[in-house]
Every structure is written in structure tokens, then in C-alpha cells.
Amino acid sequence: MKPFAALLIVITVISCKNSENKGEASSADEQTAVPLPISPDHRPEYLSKAGIFLDLATLQPHSSFLAYEINHEFWSDFGTKKRWALTGAPGIRQENANWQIPVGSTFIKHFEMPTSQVDLSQIRSVETRVLVKSASGWIASSYIWNEAQTEATLAKGGETIELSIQRGTGPDKVINWTVPSEGQCFSCHNEKAGVILGVRPRQLNRPNPSGEGNQLELWQDKGWLQGNWSNDEAKPYPSRQDANTNAEALARAYLEVNCGFCHQPEGFERNLNLSWSANLQSLQDASFFYDDLGIADAKIVAPGIPEQSLLWLRMSRTDRYRMPYISSYEVDERGLAIIADWIQSLPSP
């Protein structure tokens, strides 16, 4: 395997001609190479006009975009994701594996939701998020898909979409999907966390989406990467569905991916470090902060007892004490199981 390398991504946003039928998806022959960058002063009202997808019906991106996948998925209230990046010149690597990403860089994250628990092939597009690095900083835009699934419209931010999932029996499950405001986007996608949270050697070190070769090696071969990583820095995160991984390693990956962007030494919630490099031993028997949830002698992690561990308890809630508290209102049962398994593996004092 080739030495892995650090990443600096340069992107040009390709756009399309203006159309009188702005509410309709553009066809491939309407696309041009005329630049129409997403900027603080200009955000296309329709996703079809952003120059990202040649065909919205199939989500065929412009040929310059690269689809990529990650090893350990973020929890998104049952939603699944597809990702693309438009990349160019090689770059540099910061300390702690965060990226210095140049002006013009663009990353796309597309969210889909199953509409039936009976027929899992039934899915609908819900939201497409676009992150662009402009000269004045990062710009976050969200596009909400219509019921006909033909177009997505620029969101105002902070909106809620009611989604229904058909169950085998009983009433439909209703999901209140929250579209974050730009400010909420950067609560997670913050500079201290590197902004593009999925761009990490441990996340990207995996087979290509095509199934041929290694994803990191592909990026290096195309000239997008430079420098070297140690084997430890590039060791892949385990999948959240991996039942054969050591309980602590799986918990560490889950906490890093879902919590570490805020809960890190330089993050918004620096009082509790849940990043990959955290000393998890220090969480055992550590006193609570903010609220004890009515638990006598509350601890962040009570070895062997998830039900007395505030870390696990806050993940199990959907009220104002829930975690994560932005854009998630559904309990991540798999995440709860991962953390419970780890806590139960800890010897009682």
C-alpha cells in the first residue's frame, strides 16, 4: 500500500445556464463550464442550478466530482448519506489530522430516508447540504427536496420536515427532520474540528466506492494528497455495525465521530474530551457537569453500570438533556448498545 498523504482540496464550482423554468430540474445538456460559485452574495435557489448534479433523478454528479465513503457513519436520525467532493491540487496537513482547505473547496452530503420498514428499497431524498470554502470563510447551504423528488430548494435554515415511515403493523413512525441553520451547521463543522468531519485518514482508508482499490490511494494517485501518515494514524475506524471489534475501540470511534467535534480540548465543550485521543479512563467515576438528571452520586461513566452513567443516559433521551442536542431527536439504539457494551466491559471499582 502506498504511503498515505495529507489533503488540501481546491475546487471550482461548475454551474449551469439560467433557465426560465427555475422550478424544474436541469438536464445534462443545459450544463456549461461557466463558473457560478456559491458565495456569501449568491446561492442558487435550486439545486439543479448549482452545477453539482447533471441529473437530479439519478444523482449523477458533474464528472469533476468524486464520490467517497467513510468507515464509521454519523448518526442522523435513521437517515443515510451519500458524499461527493470536487478536488484538485495537493496540500498540507495540520497537527491532529485536521485539514487546511483552500478557497473554492466544495463538499456535498446528500441525505435519504427509508419510507418503509417493510420494503427497505423505498427511500426518498430529504436534504442535500453543500459546504463551500470562500475567500471570506466557509458557507453552508441546505437544499430541501420536494415531494415529487424532482428538485431541491434552498432552505432558509432551522426548518423542520415531517417524514413518515411505514411500519409492518400499527401507525406510521413520524420523524421530525430538522434542517440546520448555517450557524447550527458550524456548531459541528467548526474550525477546531477541521470543518469537513469525514475527511480523516481513519475514515477514508477503505475500499473505493467502485470496489476497486483503496480510496486513500486513489486520492493520492490523482495528485490530491502529499506527505505521509503513520500506520496508526491511518488505521481505519471500525464500522458502527462491526460486532467483532474490541468494545473500547468501537466506543472510542463512535464518540470521536458523533461527539468529538465539540467535546475536544479546543472545542465548544472542552470540559469533556470524547475525541479519539481522549483518556477514556478519566471518564470513569468522573463527577457530572451541567445536570445530574436526578441520579444520586451521578458519574459521567459508572464502570459496569450504563443506567448510572450520564454519558449513556443523555444519549438515551429526546428532551432538552439529549445528546447530541443539534439536529437529532431520535435515539440511536445502535449507538446506545456500543456505549453500553463498553461501560459493561469496565471492571467495577
Image (spheres, rainbow, N blue to C red):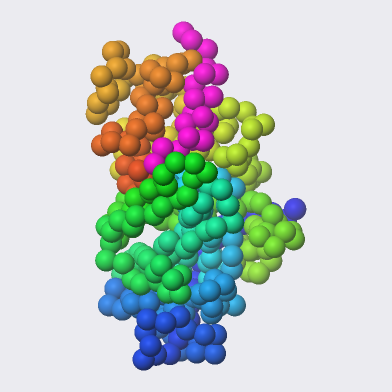
In this view, which residue lies farthest toward the front?
Answer: 170
Front residue of 8/272: it is 272
Residue at horizontal 38%, vertical 48%?
Answer: 174
Within the magenta stretch, is there residue 263? no
Residue at horizontal 66%, vertical 60%?
Answer: 209
Query: Is residue 294 shown to the viewer in this render?
Result: yes
Within the magenta stretch, is there residue 335? yes
Front residue of 7/317: it is 317
Residue at horizontal 63%, vertical 69%?
Answer: 223
- Residue 14 coordinates in the image, percent (x, y): 48, 81
- Residue 192 coordinates in the image, percent (x, y): 38, 49
Residue at horizontal 56%, vertical 48%?
Answer: 118
Residue numbers of the magenta segment? 330-349
Query: Is residue 186 shown to the viewer in this render?
Result: no
Front residue of 287/291: it is 291
User: What secondary structure characterizes most of the magenta part?
Assistant: helix
Check the image and report above or below for 127 versus 342: below
Left or right placement of residue 68 versus residue 107 in this view: right
- Residue 346 coordinates in the image, percent (x, y): 52, 17
Check the image and report above or below for 38 versus 332: below
- Residue 289 coordinates in the image, percent (x, y): 27, 26
